[in-house]
Image (cartoon, rainbow, N blue to C red):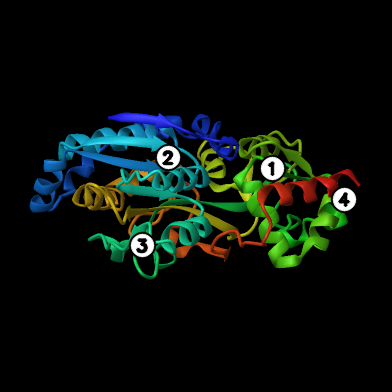
Amino acid sequence: MKLSFGYGGSRHLWTCAAIFVAIAVAAATLSSAQAITFDPEKLKRAKKVGKLTWYGSIYPETLRDRLVKDFEQRTGLDVNLYVGGTGQIVSRLKTERKAGSRNVDVFDGADLEVINNELIKTGLMRPYVPTSAASITGKFKHPESYWHGMYFWTLLLEYNTKFYNEGNVPKTFDVLNKDIYKSKVVVSDPARSAAGLGFIKTMVHWKGWDWVEKFAKNDPLVVAIGPGVEQAVVNGERPIGTVVSSFTSATLKKGGPVAISNPEHLFSSPEVVGVMKDAPNPDGAELLVEYLTSKEVHEMFKGSGWFPCRNDVSGPYGMPAAADLQLKFMSAPSIGLTREEIAKKFHSMLRK
């Protein structure tokens, strides 16, 4: 196994996430994973090539290390994994192709807009239907099978039960700019956090910049990254937060003083996997996709606090299964502005 890393600033959203999920990941076992089988002829052809290159962003590190080692042991293939944020990996792929390099077999990432526009439409990926495709929840697989979901997180509305109850808690995201919630809400910074960026993009798409401007004037606490939102809600600094589901799940599992305000989560951010069109080891690439979409591996995703994308695996602690989850938006909508432009506009509103 060979690992290389290239994370940028937006990936810092998950830097502290291991604190919440490390114990669960360490406790996860692969005993049930013995049911995973591979096409023997495909495996034979893949082993003639011998190695497999995977560009992806599976997190946390303990999870991806376990996956790589287990796949290597099962197949005898040597996996070279480069880790980075979705945008960073796509930029690297485009740069490599300009230089004539065609060395990547499998890609996984989390920004569907980037994946669909810059990898699929430009012909860098090809369709592949894994044997378990029917078990992937419909909204988490590409209609033409270019990618299939592995896991996802959602943005939900969480509150501290020492300050609010079901009778007086805000029920929807769009009321967070009302006077009654002034100085009560914490969000993450769109300049650094994928969750914070998704929140602003989604609210602009749904309610417009006027809503965001009123929200900014309502004295929200803006913290750098996602884990800080959960911390602020738990300690009561701000008893209402727009929180990443994995953090809520971990706090609920520990018996922390939080609850989910509304079963409808604002949006999801799925991690999806697919095969590169010019993969040097096409059979090995398909075997890895088979592995990463298997039920046993999705149980591991669940153990790390993520929502598995399969409809036959339950959700993480305190959450519904993917098939039963209510989402306002499938993913954070595009609003035609860059991250830098969105963050600059939001921060200017905060300063008014």
| Residue at the disc numbered 1 | 191
Between discs 3 and 2, the one toward the N terminus: 3
Q: CA–CA distance between discs 3 and 1?
A: 30 Å
Does residue 310 lie above or below 13 as drawn?
A: below
What secondary structure is marked by label 2? loop
Mark 3 lies on residue: 146
Q: What amino acid type is highlighted by mark number 3?
A: Tyr
Q: CA distance from mark 3 to mark 2?
A: 25 Å
Q: Earlier in the sequence, mark 4 or mark 1?
A: 1
At x 73%, y 37%, the residue is 236
Q: Residue furthest right?
A: 352
* Residue at image coords 36%, 30%: 3
Residue at far front of view: 99
Q: Which residue is mark 2?
A: 304
SS state under label 1:
loop
Please, what is the three-letter code of the amino acid marked with disc 4? Lys
Q: Is residue 43 left or right of residue 5?
A: left
Circles 4 and 1, Cβ within 8 Å, touching? The answer is no
Residue 259 visible? The answer is yes
Dividing the picture into quadrants, the one containing residue 61 is: top left
Q: Position of residue 88 (x, y in %)?
A: 51, 42
Q: Residues within 10 Å of mark 3 (few under 14, many from 20)?
A: many
Q: Is residue 182 visible?
A: no
